[in-house]
Image (cartoon, rainbow, N blue to C red):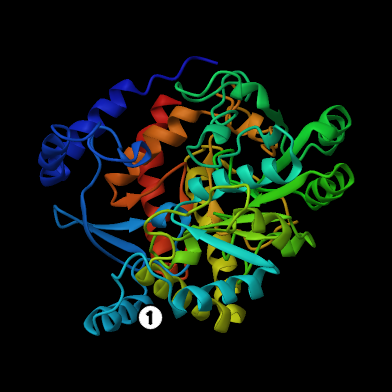
Amino acid sequence: MKPRDYSPLMAQFAVEYAKHAPKSAALHERAIKYTIDGGSNTLRLLQPFAPRIVSAKGAWLQDEDGHRILDFWQGHHANILGHNPEMVTSALARAFGEGSGLQTGFTDRLQIETAEIICQQTGAERIRFTTTGTLATMYAILLARAFTGRDLMLKVGGGWHGGQPWGLKGVGYHDGFAAMDSAGIPAGLSEQVLITNFNNVEKLHDDFRRYGDKLACFILEPIIGAGGLMPATKAYMQAARELTQKHGVVLILDEVISGFRFRAGTAAALYGVQPDLMTLGKAIGGGMPVAAIAGRADILSLAGRGGKVKFEGGTYAAHPACMLAGKTYMTYLIENEATIYPTLAALGKKARQIVTRAFAEAGIHVRFAGDRNQDLPGNSLHMLLFPYEEGHELITPEEVRNPAICDIILSEKVLQLGLLLENVFTMHGLGSTTTAHTEADLQFLGEACRRFAQRVKPCL
């Protein structure tokens, strides 16, 4: 197989994009004078520059250059109903008009009501709020270590649990998932984080035979994010629950992405699994920065007054405006669960079919990671992959992130810029569908993919 050289095509895309979005280009030049690479989240900083967004509604964005852009990134997968849902914006506008929402540093009714909703929908006994999924997973690991008195933790290769010290091993693929992904980590911490293989039940049993009595926790996503947006198998989830119980290990399910994405509650419930702790974020905030750790009272009580774990949540933890947005959003999801989630499932399936067909018409074979796994039905999360050979099943992060198996440059870089020229915003191959996306939107995506396929085909 000849090496693929995308540099001429990417150079042409860059020239076209600079002409397409001159105001965003100028703002990028301003941004790099004061911020690192032009912003505060590297993932958002597309090259040669990111579109600067001025407004968003439903499935669509508008940038500084006046372009309407069909969005499949949807708030880092946080949006179930699209951008700026009316029930949330109206509730916030009313509160602000009444002089409420920005009083920071107190407790109120909204925090109680939001906590009640989450505990009732997830089976958790107690909850404590913070502001980001990163902080939620960090505090969950601290709680597990304090509760068990053990030091080691187990995570899946390719799993992303935020930019906190215990989460920064085994994220990026470096001939496997054994490496630390950041400098500045305290010496010795890497040895405390053990890596296992997603959906490999045999390997999981072996890990617990070897380390079970030393593990504080096993942290796991029901649908792995950075590693391919593929669901766990039922056998794997149930093995995780059985082995952690047997060895006295705290099972932490990271549902920052999956919580309220597949149902008005946890994805774990669809597997018949109740974790010891769960982390939530994204959808529970209704577009505002809300995250939480929920689960067993005896573990979370360690964060209470006189407890072992210093867990204060942060200045803006349980912020009134955020609680109002989250409460309003989750209430809507619960009341309309019977229609929202079947709609999400149908739109997700349709999006994958349309994109697959668009590339097939150009003779380009594509796959969506985990699309044959039916243990977590109704997937509205999508990572488009370009395997070099059609035979690869692409059911593990080791396959999905291996540049010898999948064309990572094409899916992560070339596709993104090429579709942006078509006024379609994607991330990690595509992103997620919401109830705000319509059949017409998906056809728009399909036509954009057809035009992109014709441009990229000579490089393959």
Taking the image as drawn, is residue 227 in sight?
A: yes
Which of 372/102 is in front? 102
Percent coordinates x, y for residue 355 in the rendering: 49, 51
Taking the image as drawn, is residue 219 in sight?
A: no
Which of 424/434 is in front? 434
Report the amino acid beneath label 1: Met
- Residue at point 45% right, 61% down? 290
> Dot 1, crowdedness within 10 Å: few (<14), some or many (≥20)?
few
Residue lying furthest top: 2
Q: Compared to 78, does 453 lie above or below?
A: above
Q: Compared to 439, does 459 lie above or below?
A: above
Q: Is residue 26 left or right of residue 110?
A: left
- Residue at point 27% right, 44% down? 421
Percent coordinates x, y for residue 133 in the rendering: 50, 50
Percent coordinates x, y for residue 211 in the rendering: 82, 29
- Residue at point 23% right, 46% down? 51
Q: Is residue 211 left or right of residue 118?
A: right
Label 1 sits on a secondary structure element that is: helix
Residue lying furthest front: 306
Quadrant in which the N terminus is drawn: top right
Which of 396/266 is in front? 266
Q: Compared to 56, does 312 lie above or below?
A: above
Q: Say which quarter of the image contains residue 97.
A: bottom left
Q: Name the residue tied to disc 1.
A: 87
Q: Say which quarter of the image contains residue 381.
A: bottom right
